[in-house]
Structures are given as structure tokens and as C-alpha cells.
Image (cartoon, helix red, strand yellow):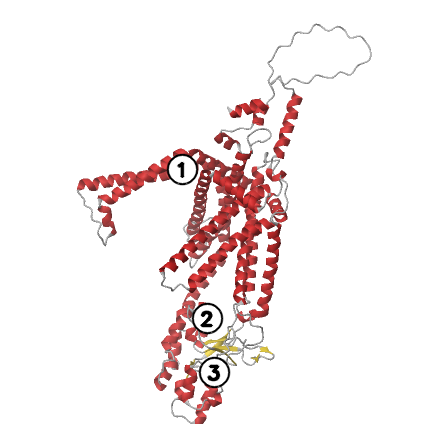
Amino acid sequence: MGRQKVAEKNSPPVMPFRPMPTAPPLSPVPPGPLMPVRLAPMINPHNPGHTSNQIARFNVAAKKMQKRHNPQLYTKRGCTDVICCLFFAVFLIGWAFVAILGFMWGQPERLIFPTDSDYRRCGSFRPGYYNMTDRPYLLYFDITKCISYASALGGCQTPQICVSACPNRYFSYLQLQTSITPSDFQRQINEALYCTDDVDKTKITSFSVLRTLVQTGKCVSYTVKSAPVLQRCFPQAIIDGADIGNSIVNNGSLDALKNAFGDDGTIPHDKQVAGQSNEVVSSIIEQRPMFDKVIHDLSQTWWQVLAMIAFSGVCAFVWTVIMRIFGSLLIWLSIFAVLGALGFGTGYSWMKWNQLKVSGAIDDFSFQPMFSVYFEMPTTWLVVAIASSSVLVLLLIVLLFIRKRISIAVALIEESSKAVGSMMSTLVFPLFPFLLHILPSGYRHLAKKNTSTKCDCNSNTPGCQFYGAEAPGDRIFYLQLYNLFAFFWLSCFVTALGDISLAGAFASHYWARDKNIDLPSFPVLRALTRALRYNLGSLAFGSLLIAIVKLIRVILEYIDHKFGKTENRVIKYIMMALKCCFWCLEVFFKFLTKNAYIMMAIYGHNFFSSAKDSFMLITRNIVRTVVIHKVAGILLFLGKAMITLGAGVIAFYYFSGRWIVEGIPHVDLYYYFGPIVIVVLGSYCMADLFFDVYEMAVDTTFICFLEDSEQNDGTPEKPYYMSAKLLEILGKRNVMEMSEKV
């Protein structure tokens, strides 16, 4: 009734039709000058009360009013959150300064060239500090402490020195404890013993002095025949790629020396060196042929792999067409499949309970080694039957009340599919944020070089030396923290820029009255330009919130790792609660900022206004929000699963030779699982990349729909922009469209 009254109020009164009286016959017109005659307006046969000129003027005015109320095109925009934009620019300048300090303090070449325990680069010369030009190779005192997985985290926990040449024989300091002449003792010390620079070999005059130096880590306890690799001395057996155990034992090496001269626990056995080395090196040697074969298979099938991944991208696009045409059918089939499965499970549980009860089965819930025994008890099936029945009844009640909202969700998903299909550039656009994400990642690692090679010197330690630069001290930690926070902030900013660009493109599709005429050209580029021109500050502010929460979570993880061995249960529970709370806060901020960017793309307001408007809009429509996200989640999950599994099955049958394609020669592969894994991973990434765009289309269309429903009422001044199907589901209509049909 209310909508009918509005229509009657805005439309002019309809005059009743009366037949015109018959005019008398015209008399002849006397000759004379012709006078101008004003023609009467043509009468509209469908509505005699309106002339065709009036209706034409009405339609033109109505269309102008529609364009005037397009919020995206005719909202006055200006720069938002300018202060935050300036702060972000200053912050990036500071990040560049951190990178400069990295090169000044860190000496990044240390990550490439070997350095000794005093952080002096082997083979280099630094005037006034050290000269290592005659010692280009790095020697590890105990190689067994380096060939382990723990060394990847804590580093090689053994002294390291620069030497002029790698050892060329097996040597144990214990062989010097025998009665030899002083000259032979000194010759062996000079030829085979390696010590740190603060040790004067001429003062090693007895075996007791040598033992003290070995036990304090000043001299090596043993050496093996080695060869340089990347200026680092490694056992020759590793370089040759032979069996390390046999190579060492056959040379008589360490065990022979220990048998001849004794063992004090500092010299490893041959098998220990072989075992430690073989743990990593032998696995590489053994897997090398397999690795080569996999690479050979990929080199032979690379174009088939790329073709299948590209085909999965085509399938992802076809899936959007399927969702547009059969989206409603897929949703309802999924719902009925769940209901059918629950119904079958409920009926089977009640039947099984009745059978066990009639047969006289008893309940015994004491510990049973066989878990299947519990399913021979009637109470087990009774609990399952009651639980499944409750869930089934609850789902039926929920579906009964939200069936209309499910229909709205399906219609919105179909509208989103149309938006993606009409703007194919949205599918390519995610490559732009992906490339931008690489920049802060690479820049972070570049700036990180300033602190990863620092050395904390202690002046009370004998032999401690500091060379050259100003010691940064605790400032290193804060610079690392600054570097990490900058990485978080810039990464979140790039994500926000991609979201608002896609949201602007999809919003322009929704608010276009005529999709063929009113939809702007290059919608994604226009949305990106608007964001760069007006909303950089708001994007920086929204990404700042998420970056702060991310940094807090990292700090909590650091504290938990630092004090993780505490036995205080209260502290453990507090840390768990804090990590859980900040994880939830990060998820909430991501949801809030994403919807704020959509409102920002529509109206161009600042971050606070957009976040408040979007949050209140969603709060007023919380049930619709939950339904649309669940329904869209079902469709996206089905799409990803179908595309990934389909690509994997096709790749399996093709590369395994079970499916022969005529015209394409089949290639015999060593391991056909290699191309299959690449196809599956590539297909999933392709589907995920595509459906991320589709998810943004659904979210934007949903926000626009809610805004359209609340701000417009269907009058010529405020017409609805939603599709005809949504109008039909909601039971609404535009008055102007009705007047055109009359």
C-alpha cells in the first residue's frame, strides 16, 4: 500500500477518456495570405491525459536524476587523511635510510665471502686493520659441528680461521705426544698445526702446552685432507662425491692415528666424520640422479605443463559462467546434499540403535583397546542419532527462515559473475599487486643485511678485537624492528591498493544504470587512478592498523620463544590468551578495512567515515552478511576443488601414458609425478588467484546492494540500481519503469 501511494502521488492525475464531438463540415477558406498556425500536441493513445512531449520531457528528467544519484560518479571527492599520507612518505624515507645504514654498518659482502671468527674477510685487505690477501680460504676447526641441520639456525659452532691453503693430509695433535726430537716437534707444529692469530707457534715447546691450546679452542685437534669450495675448506671425500666412510677409512686417517697415538675425546672417529657428512652430503649425492631425471622430465614436458595450467585458468573463467547460469542450482543441490546425508545418517543411526537394543547388546564404556567395540554398544548409536537429528532439525528450521536470504545471495553471486565477465581486465590486475609485493620483500632482505652480521664484542675477553666502524649497540635491534614493521606496513598497503582498485571497478558496474552505456572504459585503471589521487592517506591508515597488530603478534612470539621454557602455567596461559586475542583482532581489522575500502571506492570518504558506515551497514544486515559469505564460500570451495582435482586427474592420465592424444607424441618419463605436482600446484594457484578477484566482486556487489536498498526507494529521484531479479525477490520496483510501461 505504501509503495502504491508513492506511485499515485508522483504520477499526474489521469483524465477520463471522453469521445470528441463530431465537428460540423468546414466551409471553404477564402483566398488570402496564409497565417501561422500552432499545431496541437499529439495525444498519447495509451494515456490520453499525457501528451507525448510531456512524457518525453519526463523521461529525460528521470534519466538525469538517475545519473545525478550515482554515488560513485557524482560524489565530490577530495584528498583524504592527508596527515597519514605524509607520515607514510616520511616513514618510507626512513626505511631508505635504514638500507643505507645496512651498507655502512653491515658489510653485506660477508654473506657471500667467508669470514673468520673475528669477522675478517678472507682474502681481503683493510688498511689499518687487517691484511688477509695471502689467506683466501676458511678452515673450520671441527667440521662435524658444521654438517648438521642445527647449524642452519645457530651457525657453525666451531672456531674458524683464514688460511693460505687447505690441509692436504690427515693429522692428529696426539701424534706429537710421542718421544720425538724438538726439531721434529717444531716442524710438525709449523707444517700441520693450525691456530688462531693470537697464538705464537714458536712458544709451543711441549705437548702439555699444545694440549692446553687445543682444549681452549686456540688450535685444531685434527685435520683431514681438504679442498676449497667457495673459498671454504671441505673434506676431499665430499668434493669427490665418493662414499665418505670408505674414503676416510681406506686412507688410514683418524682411526689409525688414534690407535697409534691415543684418544683424549677431542678427535672424532672415522665413522663419526663419515656419518655426520653422509647425513647431508650422501643424501644429496644419492638423490642427484633422481633430481636430474625430474629436471629432464620437466624440460621435456614444460609446454604440456604450461598448457594444462592455462587450461585450468580457462576452466576458472568457465566456472564463473556456470555460477552465473547454474549458481542457484549448485547452491540448492549442495544444501539438499547436506540435508540428504544428515537424513541418511540419522535414519541409519536410529536403525542401528534399535537393532542393538533388540539383540540385547550391553554398554561398557571402560577402556577398550579396539575402538570399534564402542560401535557395538546401543548407547553410542543413540548419542549419534540424537546429535544428527538435532542438527537436521536445526538446519531445517534455519533454512525455513532464511530461504529468501539464500535466494538473495545466489542472485548477488550471479550479478558478481556478470561483473567479472564484463571486465576481463580484473583477472589480469592481481599480477600488479603481486609484483608490488615482491618489492618490499626484496627491499626488506636488502635492508636486513645491516644487522645480520653484527658481532657483540666483550672487552674483557682475551683476544677480542674490533675493527673500524662505530659499534651500533642496541640500536641494531630497533633498526631490525623498524625494518620488519616497514615490511608489514608496505605489504598491507599494496594489498589495500589492490582491494580498492577492484572494488572501484566492480562498484562502477553495479551503479551503471545501463551496463552497455554507463559503464566507464578502463574501469580498473580509473579506480586505481582515483585511489592514487585521493585515497593514499586512507589506505596508509588502514594498512597501518593491520601492520601494528602484526608487529605485536611477532613480539609476543619472540617473548614466548625467549621465555618458552618457563614452568609458570599462569604466564603460559596469559601468553596463549594474548596471542589468540591479537590473532582475532587482526582478522577483525582485515574484515573492517576491506569493507571500508569498498565504501571508500564508492563515496571517496576518509577511512574513519568509510569504516564506520560499512560496519554499521553490515551490522544492520548481519544475517544477510553471514548467508552471503557462507554461500559464496561454498561456491568458491567447489570451484577450487573441481579445477584442482580435474587438472590433477588429467595430468595423471596423460603423463602416466594412460591417455594418448593423437597428434602429440608421448614422452617416456622417469618420474611422471614431477609434472603432475607442478600442474596441481599451478592449477590451484591459478584458481586461487582468479577466485580472490571473484570474492572481491561478491563483497563489493553485496555492499553496493545493501547501500542501494537503504538509500533508494524506487522513485524517479532515488531509483534502485539492483538487477530485475533482486527487485523481484525483494518485492520492490522502480516507479519510473512502471510509468514507462503505462
Marks 1 and 2, how far apart in space? Answer: 57 Å
Please say whether residue 144 is visible from this viewpoint.
Answer: yes
Tell me the kind of residue under disc 3. Cys
Tell me the kind of residue under disc 1. Leu
Q: Could you say whether the residue bearing mark 3 is in a helix, strand or loop?
A: loop
Marks 1 and 3, how far apart in space? Answer: 77 Å
Tell me the kind of residue under disc 2. Gly
Please determine whether, in this image, residue 258 is positioned above or below residue 38.
Answer: below
Residue under label 3, please give it. Answer: 195
**Left or right of 643 in this view: 440:** right
Mark 2 nearby-residue class (10 Å; few <14, some 14–19, many ≥20) = few
Image mark count: 3
Question: Percent from the top left, x then y, of residue 370?
Answer: 23, 53
Circles 1 and 2, Cβ within 8 Å, touching? The answer is no
Please determine whether, in this image, residue 137 is positioned above or below residue 10.
Answer: below
Give the residue at x 36% y 76%. Answer: 271
Q: Quadrant of the C terminus?
A: top right
Q: Earlier in the sequence, mark 1 or mark 2?
A: 2
Give the residue at x 61% y 36%. Answer: 518
Q: Identify the mark at residue 155; answer none if there is no mark.
A: 2
**Which residue occupies the foreground of this view, 419 or 394?**
394
Q: Earlier in the sequence, mark 1 or mark 3?
A: 3
Q: Nearer the viewer, mark 1 or mark 3?
A: 3
Mark 1 nearby-residue class (10 Å; few <14, some 14–19, many ≥20) = few
Q: Earlier in the sequence, mark 3 or mark 2?
A: 2
